[in-house]
Amino acid sequence: MAGKKSKTPSKILVIVESPSKAKTIGKMLGSRYRVVASVGHVRDLPKSTLAIDTENNFEPRYINIRGKGDIIKMLKKEAKQASKILLATDPDREGEAISWHIAYLLGIDINEPCRIEFHEITKTAVKAAIKNPRKLDMNLIDAQQARRILDRLVGYQISPLLWRKVRKGLSAGRVQSAALKIIVDREKEIEAFVPEEYWTITAEFIKNRTKFKGDLVKYNGKKIRPGDSAGADKILSELARGEYRVVKTEKKETRVKPSDPFRTSTMQQAASGKLNFSARKTMQVAQQLYEGVDIKGRGTIGLITYMRTDSVRISEEADAAVRKLISNDYGPDYLGTNVYVNKSKGVQDAHEAIRPSDPELRPEDIAGSLTSDQYKLYNLIWCRFTASRMASAVYDSSSAEIENSGYTFKASGSKLKFDGFTKVAGRSAEDKKKKHMPDLEKGETVSLAKTAADNPLKEQHFTSPPPRYTEASLIRELEEKGIGRPSTYAPIVATLSERRYVKKEKKALVPQEIGMQVADLMDKYFSDIVNAGFTADMEKKLDSIEEDGVDWHTVVSDFYGGFSRDLEKADKSIEKIVVEDEPTGRNCPQCGRPLVIKHGRFGRFIACTGYPECKYTESIKDPIGVKCPKCGKDILRLRSKRGRTYYRCDGYPECDVFYFDKPTDRRCPECGSLMLEKSGRNHMYICSNKECGYKEPVKESSTTEENLNEKAE
C-alpha cells in the first residue's frame, strides 16, 4: 500500500498480536520497520446474539470488537503511512484468521503477498520470513471459521436450554461436553467397581551376600494368584517342605530410547507431573518464553518455538545445532540416531515440535534472566529436546525363574551400563530402584535370606478401580481419542473447573453433582455431541477443510441438520431440574437453625434455613490458588450482592488487598507487581500497579468454548 508523501521515508509496517511480541521483534528489525500489535482479535462474532445466519448458508456476522476502536484507528493510521504492510500474527489457524480480519479492516487485497509467518522469534527466523511473504491461506481461515461457527451454534443454543431447565451459569460445548462425559463415565466406573481380594507371595533370596527378590507367578506352568489367606497359607506350607532351584536364566543388553520432543499435549502432561503446573499455567509461561525474554548480553529473544503444535518434527538446522552441542558437551558417544514420526494424518506438520530456539542457551546460563516458572519450564523443554537427540541408555538386564514344589518365582534386575540420554533427562525414581542380580546358573539351588521370619512373605491386596482423571491424563485421553486440538486442551479443562462441573482433589478431577446432571442430560438428548467417536470424526472433517479444501458450509450444514432436531426435541422433553440444598453441618450464628449451601443466580452461597425470618448468608471460601502479594494468605473469589465477581485477601479486614479483575501467579515484566487477568472482549493481562500500566493480550484460541459461552457468566 502506498504511503502519503512525507519528509521522512515510509516504513514497512509489521502487525503482530501482542505488545510484548511487537517489542521483541521491533528491536530485531531496526528503524526501517514499524512493529505494532493488534492485541489479539479485532473483529469477531458479537456476544449478544447467535450471529450465524442459519437460513443463509450459515454466514457469520462479524463486528468490530467493542473496546478495540482505538487500536483499529491506530492500525489504519499506521497503514496509511506505511510503504508496505506485513501481517505477522501467530502461525496457526487462529493467527491466519486474525490476519484476514486485519486485512479486511485495512483494505488489503487477500491475493497480495502480505502474510509472513515464523515459528520462533529469532532475528534469523523473522528476517527470513520477511523475505518470503505469501498470500493469506483461505483454507486455514475457512477451517478456523468452521470451528468458530460450529462451537457458536452448539454453545449459544444448548447453554440457554440448560439455564431454563437446570440453572443459570451453566454451559455446554462441542468439545467441552465430550470431555465432561469422559470424566463422568470414569466416575460411574469407579462407583460400580466391586473390589476383589487377592494375595501375593514374595521370597527374598541370597547368593554371595547379595539379596534379591522374586515374585510367585506360576504353579505347574499356569498363572496363579491366591484369592484368600487360606490359599496363600497352603502355598507357604508346601514351599516350606521343598527347595528353591533355578530352572531358567536370561541375560541381555537392554536399550531404552529417549522420548520424542514435546508436543503441546506432552508438554502439558510433563509440566503437570514434574512441575505441578496446570495446563493453563503451562501455556501462559510457554507464551512468555515464545514471545521473548530479555537475556543479559543477548537482548530480547524468543526462547522456544511456537507452543501450539501436534508435530514432533524438528528442522535440519535445529538438529545440527543440538548434535554439535551434545558432541561438545558430552562426547560423540552420546549422539543418537533417533527418528520420530508423527502418528496421525491430521498433524499440522508446518509446525515443529516445541524446542529451544537456540540449544546453546543452556538453562543454567540464562537462569538469572528468567522468573522461577520460566526457568522451570524452559529447563523441562531444553532437557527433553536435547535428550531426544541423544543415544539410548544401555542396561545389563538379567532374569531368572526359580522353582519350588511346582511353584515358580520370577526375579529380575538390571544395572546401568551407559547412561546415554539420562545424562540430561535424568533417571526416573523407578529406574533408580532397580538392582543388579547376582549371577545364577540353571540347576543350582538358592537359599532364602534369613533376615525375616516371614520369608516368603504373603500380602493381602484388593483390585483397584480405574483412577480418576487428572488434567494430564485427561489431555492424553482427549489426544488419543482425537478430541480437540492443541489450542483447546488447556481452556477446556479450565472451563470444566470454572463451571464447577468438576473439582480438583489432589490433582484428580472429581465430577460434581451438577456436572453429572449436565453430562447425563447431554448424553440423553445430544448423544452425538458427547460421543467421543462422533467428536473425533468431526475434528477430521474440520481438518479436511484446511488440508483438502473441503467447503466449510457443507461441513457445518451436515452437522446442523441433526443437531437442530435434537435441540427441538430436548426443549420439549426435559423437565425442570430442582437442585437440592447441601447441608453444611453448621448452625446459623444468629438463630441457631441449620445452614445449607444454596445455588443461586450468581453461584453457590451459604444461607440459613430459617429464611425469610432469618436472612443470614455468607460467601463460600473459594481460593483461586494465588497468594496475596501483601501478606501471603490465599486470595478468594467472592460474589457481591449484585452478582459481581471480585477477589479479596483471606486476611480481610486486617489485609485490604482487593481486586475486581482475577489475580494470576504471573508477575509484571516491567515492575514486578501481580498481574491481573481482565476478561471480556479485550481478554488481557494487566499490571495491578496502576502507575505501571503494562498490559498484554491473553493468547487463547477464540474457537475454544470458554470464550464462546461467556454469556453464561
Image: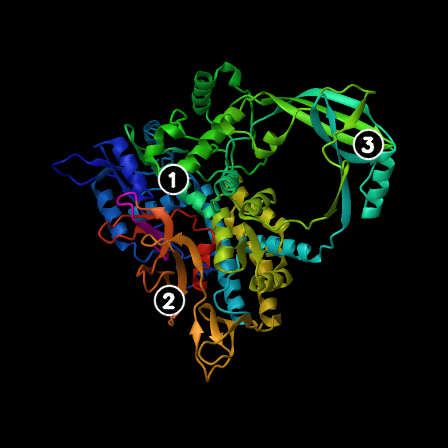
Please tell me which residue lies in front, 468 or 487: 468
Give the x, y percent position of residue 373.
40, 41
Nearer to us in this view, 244 or 266: 244
| Residue 128 in magenta stretch | no
Q: Residue furthest left?
A: 7
The amino acid on which the numbered mark 2 sits, given as a three-letter code, is Arg
Q: Amino acid at mark 3?
A: Thr
Is the Cβ of the residue at disc 2 closer than 8 Å to that at disc 1? no
Separation of marks 3 and 2 at Cα, in angstroms: 68 Å
Residue at the image point whose x is 80% and y is 41% from the top: 225
State whether residue 228 appears in this view: no
Q: Is residue 635 visible?
A: yes
Q: CA distance from mark 3 to mark 1?
A: 52 Å
- What's the mark number on residue 644? 2
Judge from the rendering whether residue 78 lies leftward or rightward of residue 544; answer left or right.
left
Callout 3 secondary element: strand
Residue type of the residue flagged with mark 1:
Ser
Q: Which residues are magenta?
A: 669-684
**Label 2 residue SS:** loop
Between marks 2 and 1, how big is the CA–CA gap?
33 Å
Q: Is residue 506 above or below residue 649?
A: above
**Considering the numbered disc 1 on the image, is that residue within a helix, a strand or a loop?**
helix
Residue 142 x/y as whole percent: 46, 46
Task: Return the disc, 2 or 1, that comes first in the chain's sequence.
Answer: 1
Tell me the colour scheme of the image: rainbow
Point 84% across, 47% down: residue: 230
Contact between labelled residues 1 and 3, with CB atoms less than 8 Å apart: no
Mark seen at residue 408: 3
Q: Disc 2 or disc 1, which is closer to the eye?
A: 1
Q: State the residue position of label 1.
A: 372
